[in-house]
Image (cartoon, grey):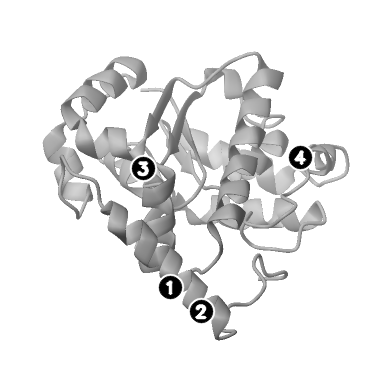
Amino acid sequence: MPNIIIFTTGASGSSVLAGLLGSQGFWLGHQTAKLQFDTYENAELVDLNVQILRKSGYPRRDANDLPPPDVRRIEDLIKTEDLGPYRAFVKECENHRPWLWKDPRLAYTIYFWRHIVDVKSVKFVVITREFDQAYAGLIHSRKVYMSPKQYKQINDNYIKAIDLFFEKMGTRSTVSLTFEDLILFPQRMMQLMNEALETSLSVEALERVYKGKLYKRRYHRVDYFRALGKFIIKKAIGDVERFPRRGV
């Protein structure tokens, strides 16, 4: 099987996809990062991505700021950084191939990694999410409060960085899907990914990873408006910091 990099905007259901692919034997790392759930993200990759962002002058651990990380400054790090730790990490991944990388920060840090990893031999999967579903999950599940306009701009910046990367490389994603594609039409998506990624994914494997119910959206339309209401109330009582916050 080929190595895989998942590009995601964050809060898009990418952890379900990574867990599903991980069940096929893709190496996820010696340790995976945890939030309120298992992200299936290589913990060392996450730490290195945070370093890349910080050394480019971007102060946050995540990439959820306006303006976003500067991909030109990230790519310029290849001229000044000690590449030893990064090459050692890639070598360790290659020792366990096929490997899978998944971290929202990769939408930006890939501009650095592309000079170290043989990206032309990697298959790229892009997963996004319907906006009302993603926003409802952000508020109800993640407990992160921001306006829909801010959240849309942050997501748009991720997609813009990903699209620019493909343009620079003269390639495109091997598979592009939404989380709703995955849970509403699982048989179809398993077939598509199996053909494109040389895997043998099954609906049963998806059911073992996904804690919700297949064949239905996670949130109803009313959940989006409830999420918006929660944000408005939080903002009205002054319980929302200016988002995005710096230095976290």
The answer to the question of whether label 2 and label 3 lie on touching residues, with beta carbons closer than 8 A, is no
Callout 2: SS:
helix
CA distance for labels 1 and 3: 30 Å
Residue 234, numbered label = 2
For the residue pair 22 and 230, the one nearer the viewer reads as 230
Rendered residue at 30%/38% (across/down): 180
Q: CA distance from mark 4 to mark 3?
A: 25 Å
Q: Is residue 182 left or right of residue 80?
A: left
| Above or below, 51 relative to 25 | below
Instruction: Please identify the quadrant where the C terminus is shown.
Output: bottom right
Instruction: Relative to 94, say whether 42 is above or below.
Output: below
Residue 36 drawn at (x, y percent): 37, 68
Q: Place residue 215 in its image quadrant.
A: top left
Question: Residue drawn 35% across and 17% down?
Answer: 196
Q: Position of residue 51 (x, y in %)?
A: 70, 56
Q: Quadrant of residue 161?
A: top right
Q: Are marks 1 and 2 in contact (CB under 8 Å)?
A: yes
Labels 1 and 4: the sequence-earlier one? 4
The type of residue carrying mark 2 is Lys
Task: Locate the N terminus by quadrant.
Answer: top left
Q: CA distance from mark 1 to mark 2?
A: 6 Å
Residue identified by numbered label 3: 18
Q: Identify the residue under disc 1.
A: 230
Q: Position of residue 86 (x, y in %)?
A: 67, 44
Between circles 4 and 3, the one closer to the viewer is 4
Quickly name the residue at label 4: 71
